[in-house]
Amino acid sequence: MSRNICIHLDFLSGQHKAKIRKTAEEAGFVPHFFLRSQFEEASACLQHCEVLYAHSPELLRTAPAGLQWYCSATAGVEPYCQNDGIFANPNCLLTSTNCYGVTIAEHVVMVVLMLLRQMPVYIETTMRHSWGEHLPVHSIYGGSFTLLGTGNIGANVARRLRGMGAARITGVSRSGKPLPDFDAVYPFQSLDEVLKTSEFLIMSLPSTAETIGLLNRERLALLPEGAFVVNVGRGSAVDQQALAHALNSGRLAGAALDVTEPEPLPQDHFLWEAKNLILTPHVSGNTSLEYTRDLNVDMFCANLQRYAQGRPLQNLVDRKRGY
Amino acid sequence: MSRNICIHLDFLSGQHKAKIRKTAEEAGFVPHFFLRSQFEEASACLQHCEVLYAHSPELLRTAPAGLQWYCSATAGVEPYCQNDGIFANPNCLLTSTNCYGVTIAEHVVMVVLMLLRQMPVYIETTMRHSWGEHLPVHSIYGGSFTLLGTGNIGANVARRLRGMGAARITGVSRSGKPLPDFDAVYPFQSLDEVLKTSEFLIMSLPSTAETIGLLNRERLALLPEGAFVVNVGRGSAVDQQALAHALNSGRLAGAALDVTEPEPLPQDHFLWEAKNLILTPHVSGNTSLEYTRDLNVDMFCANLQRYAQGRPLQNLVDRKRGY
C-alpha cells in the first residue's frame, strides 16, 4: 500500500509541486495536492494519508488517527497546541515553518524607521494637503534596540539593524545564550531590568502560556519615557488598553502593531484611534514573496527526507510548551 | 588685525561652539556666533570677516568683497551657483557640507520598504478603521535598484540595500566609475538604456543645468510597467505632471518625493492626490540627528585647518558647474 501525503495550500507554483513530487517519490510517498477551496476533497484524501502539509486547523480536525506528521506552513502554531483533541493521534508530530524571517524583518525595519522619523505625523499632515514642519527625528544609526524574541525573526531583524549602524542590540530569550549580531542576550527572568533601559522594544514572540499578557501595564510602565514598541509576534503578548493609554498620554512616543487581539480588529476598536500607532492587518509575514514560498517548500522537502529516513525533524514543536 | 569668521546657524550646541572656537584659535581666527534670528547683527559682523559658515543666501548677499570662503552648511548649493552676483567677491571659495548621507539613506530605506510593501494602501485602509486584505508585497532582499546619483547619499543607500540582501544595485553617475556596493555604474549618457530595466529608481541628484527636467515624460515612459520612483535630491529633476499621470494611470506602482517644485507645495497642487505617492516636506536631510550636526561641524573644522594652511578645501564647489 502506498504512503500518502495530503497538501492543502494555495501558494504552490508548478515548480513547487514538481519539487515536492520528486522529493516524495524518491522517499517512497505519493503527494496529493488540493487548493484551500477544495476542503471536502482534501479531507476525503486525508483519511488515507500519514502526512499533512497545510495551514488549516479545520482540516487537521478531520484527520484520522493514522496521521503521523502535520507540517504547518506557518511559523506560529498556537492553534495546534491547544489541548482539545485537535489531533486524533496524540503522538502525531507537529512542525512549524520558520521561513518568514526576511519578510517580517523588512516590515520591522520599515515601521522602526517610520516611528523614528515621525511618519505618522507626516502622513496625517499630508492627508490635509498641508506641507508639514520639520520634526525632530531619530535614527537606527547609533540607536539602541531591545529584541524580545531572538529566533528566526529576531535574528533577521538584528542583522539588519546592525548593518544600518545600530550602536547596541540587546536580546531577551528563554535561554539568554549569546547570539551573533547581539551585544548581549538576557534570559526572560531579566526582562523587567532590561525594559527599564529599552528605548526601542521589538517583540516577535510566539503565543504560549508564558507570553500571553507578557507586556502588561506594569511592564509598559518600566519602559523609559518616549520609548517605542513594535509587535510582530502575537497580539496576545500585549495589554492593548495599557498600550493605547501610554500612547495617548504621550508617555510612549509611538508603536507599530502587525498583530492584535482579536484579528480582524472590529471597526469600533479603541486601537484605531491610538496616537502615533501604526496598524497593519497581520501582513508582515505573508507568503507573497517568492523567496518565502520557495523556502517554505524547501523546508518541507528537507523534513520529508528526514521523516522518510526516520531522522529527527527540524522545527519540531513541543505541543505542551507551544513552540 | 584679527582674521574673523562669521557663523550664522541655529543647530550648534555648546560643545560644537567650543570645538569651532578651539580650531579657529589654533588657526589664528576669531569666530563670531549668531542665531538665524540675529540677521542684522550677523550682517554687521560679516563686513569684517573673511569666512562665513551658514546656510543663508540672504546673508551671503550682504557679504563684502573681502569674503574669501563661504561654507554652506547644506549639501545642495544651487542658490549660490546662480550667476547673479550673489558673491561680491567673484573668486570667493564655496564649499558644501555632505553630512546628510546617513539620515537621507534611512529615509530612502523607509520609503523603499513602504512602497514595496504597499503601505500607502494600508494607511488609507487604516484611516477608515478597516482591517485590510493581504496584498502582494516585494522585498529589498533579492531586489534590483537603480541609483541615479552615487555621491554621499547614493553610497549610503547602496550600502544599506546591499546589507539587506539586494541582488543588484546599478549606479548612474557623471563618470560611470566603479564604486563599492554597486554591481555596475554607468555614465549619464547610458541613462536611457539603464531606465528600461530599472524596476526601482532612486534619485539623489543636485540641481544643476544638466539635472533640471532630467526625468521627463519620455524617460518616465522608459521605466518598466510597475516600476517605483524615489526622489530625495531636488524637485526640479522630475516632470511632476508626467509622474502624477504615470501613477494615476497605474503604469508606475508607486513613488516617494521628499522634494518638489515648488516647496512648500500649494494646498491645491495635483501631487497631493496622486495615487500611491508618499509625500514628505523635504525632511529627509534635516539636522535633527546629533550625528548629522556633529559631522557638519567636524567637516567645517577640518576645512578650516586646510584653509588656514593654504591647502585645497574638501567639497569645493565649481560655481559654474553647480556641484
Image: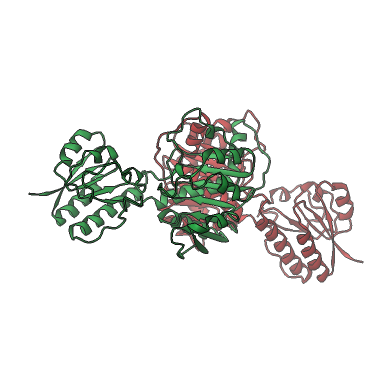
Chain colours: A red, B green
Residue at image point 55% right, 34% down: A241
Residue farthest to the right?
Answer: A1
Q: Quadrant of residue B236?
A: top left
Q: Nearer the viewer, residue B293 or A202?
A: B293
Residue A171 picture location, percent across and down: 50, 55
Residue A193 picture location, percent across and down: 44, 49
Residue farthest to the left?
Answer: B1
Residue B215 visible from this viewpoint: yes
Residue B85 is left or right of residue B113, and the answer is left
Residue A74 picture location, percent across and down: 69, 53
Residue A230 is left or right of residue A261, and the answer is left
Residue A60 is left or right of residue B309, and the answer is right
Relative vertical location of residue B281 with respect to residue B31 in this rendering, above or below: above
Residue B78 picture location, percent across and down: 35, 45
Q: Nearer the viewer, residue A19 or A72?
A: A19
Q: Nearer the viewer, residue B104 or A293?
A: B104
Relative vertical location of residue B46 with respect to residue A312 in this rendering, above or below: above
Residue at image point 53% right, 33% down: B272
Residue at image point 66% right, 38% down: B132
Relative vertical location of residue A301 with respect to residue B320 in this rendering, above or below: below
Relative vertical location of residue B171 with respect to residue A229 in this rendering, above or below: below
Number of labels in the image equals 0
Residue B38 visible from this viewpoint: no
